[in-house]
Image (cartoon, grey):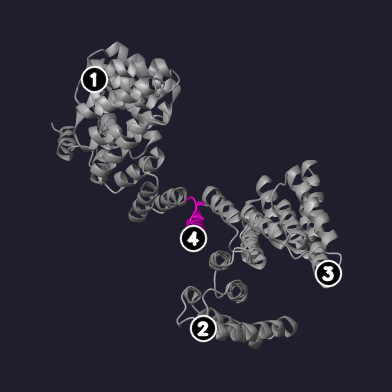
Amino acid sequence: MSEQMLLQPIQASNPEKAREALEKARTAHEKYLVRLQNSDLQEAIEHYIDAVKYDPAMPEAYYRLATLMWEQGQISLDTAIEQCKTAVSLAPQNINAHLYTGFFMKLAQDFQSAEQEFKSAIKMGKLKSARPRLILSQSILQKINSKNGSISDYLNFLYYFVSGSVMLAWDKPSMKMFYKNMSDDFSVFTYNTVGKFLEKIKLNQTAENVYKQAVMATNHGEIFYNKMGDLALKNKELDLTVDCYRKVLEQNPQNREVLIKLATVLQTYFPENTDDAIDCYEKLLEFGMDTAQIYYELGHLYLQKEDKINSISAFKLAVDNDSENPFYNNSLAYAYSKAELYDDAIEHYQKAISINPDKEWTSIVCQALGSIYAEVKGNIEAGISTYQAGIILDPNNYELYLSLGDTYMATYDLDSAIRTYCDAIMLNPEDYRGYSKAGIALWEKDYLEEALVSFHKSIDLNPENEYAQNNLGILYLDGLGDAEEALEYFEAAVELNPSYTLAYFNAGRASQAMGFTNDAAHYYQMAIDLNKITQDLDEEDIQNRLHRLFDI
């Protein structure tokens, strides 16, 4: 049956037939409660639907039909709440309409709204409000069990429980049914309290055993699997965490809090389970809450999968929901740049920068935008201006100095490049990259001694940097004419990176200068073989050098 059939009557109003249908529905409903036969349930549903069709203003039909159809899984929890709200709107003074609405809100863990409905029923019932008082006390106790209750929650529970018990004294059947439910809730309360105490004194394994017992002893596995999952996460038992959260959702797929926890754990600790995390976030979208944040997380998950189209779509929906969020704009810009849609990327990077929530963060965005201007668009002036703006925002951003220096090098503005790299070195003298880049700029400027010092410092800080080893060799070979010293650095570069075409070529040049013909031939041939893959050098030049080794 469709959920929509509850919303629109298909016949003209006929109060008399509506009352007949409602009476038949009540009779069938009572039989179902006694015999638990599905035929009685279906008959009750059909008559309640008839009652709504004949008289759309009959509140009782709405909340009772919502209850039965929800039990059958024919409507969602949200739809059941809406139908009960319809009953309240039709009969604001109907106590049962408020009670049923509160009941479904409690199932959705919207305890605050549920309490408001129960209090409305209490206000209307006055001295005959025993049932709503006890139901409200039960709701407060469930809130305490599922969340960390405050002192006020405990006092409210006691007040409504005691006052409701006093008023219920003459209602024996209702009292018997209520105390049956309450005994289970008190059992939950006991296990919950003991478990929390054991956690506080660091007896986590014992606390876990208590929660396992509670799952078996009560009808509230949802609460205790949740607690077991939280405890497992605290102990970094990640597989157990996921398993417990999944068991919670098996019992209550509408538990939004646990869906968020599961999605976060999967996204953070199980990058191989990207599809499962995406599925969790898509289910969270159905709640219609925090949609911008959820789309934002989905965008990052799609980026992990290298799904450019869906990542852009998700980030765009996040921006559509919150256009002034700088982080959403930045992520959308990044997704656009990954898809090589650079004009769109520039637009959203600019928007993120203009919002400027934090100077350090914004300076990083400036670096991303500057690289697009300088490296992709070829707009060097815009790139330099953007990098400089980032440095003004955060003068301690080492990466920005390196990027700005690289841009100056690309335009052969050596003085500016050297000055910028030196600023980077002053900012972080323990990072080898600044020295290595400064060494290249100094060599290009014919400051040979300074370049040697810079490259040596770079290698001292990071001996594993094959590029600095190769460049230092070039300085010794071409700057100082010391082929023997140079060869040591070229060989070190080759040892660090056996696929380094240029280092083999330079090792060949050094060997040739020292008269080691066979070694030079070996290095040149290695450079030729590797160059077929890397295409770093002019192969004809290497071939000519190789042939000249054996010219008479």
Residue segment shown in magenta: 271-290
Up-down: is 547 above or below 1? Answer: above
| Label 2 or label 3, whichever comes before in sequence order | 2
**Image location (x, y in percent) of residue 358:** 43, 29
Q: Which residue is mark 4?
A: 286
**Image location (x, y in percent) of residue 150:** 73, 44
Judge by depth and name the residue closer to the eye, 5 or 527: 5
Q: Amino acid at mark 1?
A: Asp
Do the residues bearing badges 1 and 3 touch, measured as CB atoms within 8 Å? no
The residue located at (34%, 32%) in the rendering is 353
The residue located at (30%, 32%) in the rendering is 503
Q: Which residue is mark 1?
A: 478
Q: Callout 2: 10 Å neighbours few (<14), some, many (20+)? A: some
Q: Residue 496's image quarter?
A: top left
Q: Secondary structure at mark 1?
A: helix
Work out whether residue 516 can be spotted.
no
Name of the residue lying farthest toward the left: 552
Q: Which residue is mark 3?
A: 171
The residue located at (33%, 32%) in the rendering is 354
Q: Amino acid at mark 4?
A: Glu
